[in-house]
Amino acid sequence: MTAAQPDRIIVAVSGASGTIYAVRALDILRSLGIETHLIVTKAGHLNRAYETDLTREDLESRADRVYNIADVAAPISSGSYLTRGMLVAPASMRAVGEIATGVSSSLLSRAADVVLKERRPLVMMVRETPLNLIHLRNMTTITEAGGIIFPPVPAFYSRPQTIGEIVDHSVGRALDQFHLHTDTFPRWDDALRAAVSSRHREVEE
């Protein structure tokens, strides 16, 4: 984006487990000066209550704009409204299915459809296991349409010590897909490789 263009990202929270990914993404995006537009499904709010001590207001206060899931006339439902793209964190298989089939039954699926048709990044932190063939086919369809399927798979080479460190790695890597660099997690580089080189020597021996 040029300096004259608004720097916005849509963040959607669906009903899968993993509200913490959206919470952390919103906090990091705010620290980067990125304007955030938040959509939360009914099931997303249920999981927030199940998984965290955050109130609805605690979550929504982290975003610059918040939309009702039924508001399909919201600005983000139009391709003329410029954004960097959309992060669905977490992404339920219902959200995946609706987006894969082009069913715009809510603002979440409509905004995702717009992001795809405008050729902007759609990053989906899918949360389900094991995956059945329907799930896999839907994710393939989204990938073929230009979306990015991004399961929050933790990396352990940096030896994370807390859940927060594991979350930061997944969220940071997801934000990489929008060309946003964060220093919230250890990246594999010469310094990190040197730090773990003794383990490599033990394996080689």
Image: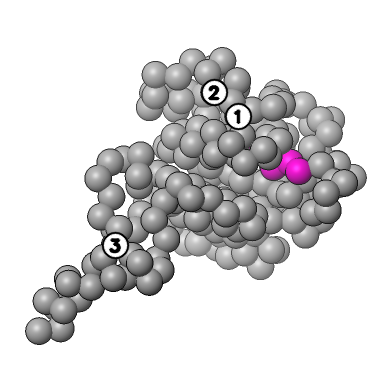
Residue type, numbered disc 2:
Leu
Q: Which type of secondary structure does the marked residue at label 3 adopt?
A: loop
Marks 1 and 2: CB-CB under 8 Å? yes
Query: Earlier along the polypeptide chain: callout 3 or callout 2?
Result: 2
Badge 2: residue crowd in 10 Å (few <14, some 14–19, many ≥20): many
The correct choice, above or below, for 158 with respect to 13 in the image is below
Relative to the observer, which residue lies in front, 19 or 71?
19
User: Disc 2 marks which residue?
Assistant: 59
| Region in magenta | 7-11
Alpha carbon of mark 3 to alpha carbon of mark 1: how far?
33 Å
The image position of residue 68, as x and y in percent, is 70, 23
Total numbered badges shown on the rendered structure: 3
Query: Earlier along the polypeptide chain: callout 1 or callout 2?
Result: 1
Q: Residue placed at 29% from the left, 62% from the top?
A: 157
In the picture, the disc for residue 157 is: 3
Residue type, numbered disc 3:
Tyr
Q: Is residue 89 magenta-colored?
A: no
User: Disc 1 marks which residue?
Assistant: 40
Badge 3: residue crowd in 10 Å (few <14, some 14–19, many ≥20): few
The correct choice, above or below, for 94 with respect to 148 in the image is above
Q: Residue placed at 83% from the left, 49% from the top?
A: 3
Alpha carbon of mark 3 to alpha carbon of mark 2: how far?
31 Å
Q: Which type of secondary structure does the marked residue at label 2 adopt?
A: helix
* Residue 94: quadrant of the picture: top right
Alpha carbon of mark 1 to alpha carbon of mark 2: how far?
10 Å
In the picture, the disc for residue 135 is: none
